[in-house]
Image (cartoon, grey):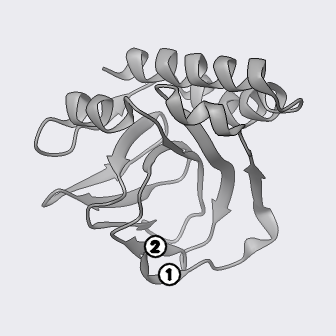
Amino acid sequence: MILNAEMGDQSRHKIGLYTSLESAELLPFRLLRYGEFTSDSRYYTEREGYRSCLLLSTISGCGELRYAGQEALLTPGRTAVIDCSHYQYYATHGEEDWKFVWFHFVGTAADAFVQMINGSGLRVMEWERWRAEELYGELSALTAAPGRQTDFLVSLWIHQLLSELA
């Protein structure tokens, strides 16, 4: 549940929704929604109790993330994966716009992977900047034709992505 939020100028936000088949609930990973935001200095989200995991990856600018009692700056190429059932706060850091890609996911293996990546805290990974820049386009292309095969491919894609970060 969102505790507080300010979206700022939403005109530069892109959001994609994906509805999987009921059978996809058995898969290790299932995509819920994804996006690419270019957020001004007013942007922030404060939340807990949302039953999903979230990947955040910075393309440009800087974001601030508070999670598991830790704080981290998400500069270009830095990526974090969190469990949204726990308290989190993320926001644009500074006056420059923060451009980042994100996606929410669930699945039979989602919580275990996030715990494996973070341990009991927060682990921020360095990633090639081009990788973050391509995520939104990859998800848009992958989810263009929903169906059983797409559900499997999306699950595999998330698994491979998380494995890169582990």
Q: Is residue 51 above or below residue 147?
A: below
Q: Nearer the viewer, residue 6 or 61?
A: 6
User: Which residue is most to the front?
Assistant: 23
Mark 1 falls on what kind of element?
A: strand
Query: Looking at the rendering, in which quadrant would you find the C terminus?
Result: top left
Give the left or right position of residue 132, taking residue 109 as reference.
right
Residue 51 rendering spot, x and y as whole percentages:
41, 58
* Residue under the point 46% across and 25% down: 28
Mark 2 falls on what kind of element?
A: strand
* Residue under the point 52% across and 26% down: 27
Q: Is residue 45 above or below residue 3?
A: above
Residue 43 rendering spot, x and y as whole percentages:
54, 74
Mark 1 sits on what residue? 5
Distance CA(mark 2)–CA(mark 1): 4 Å
Circles 2 and 1: CB atoms closer than 8 Å: yes
* Residue under the point 66% across and 39% down: 22
* Residue under the point 74% across and 73% down: 10
Q: Nearer the viewer, residue 102 or 128?
A: 102
Mark 2 sits on what residue? 45
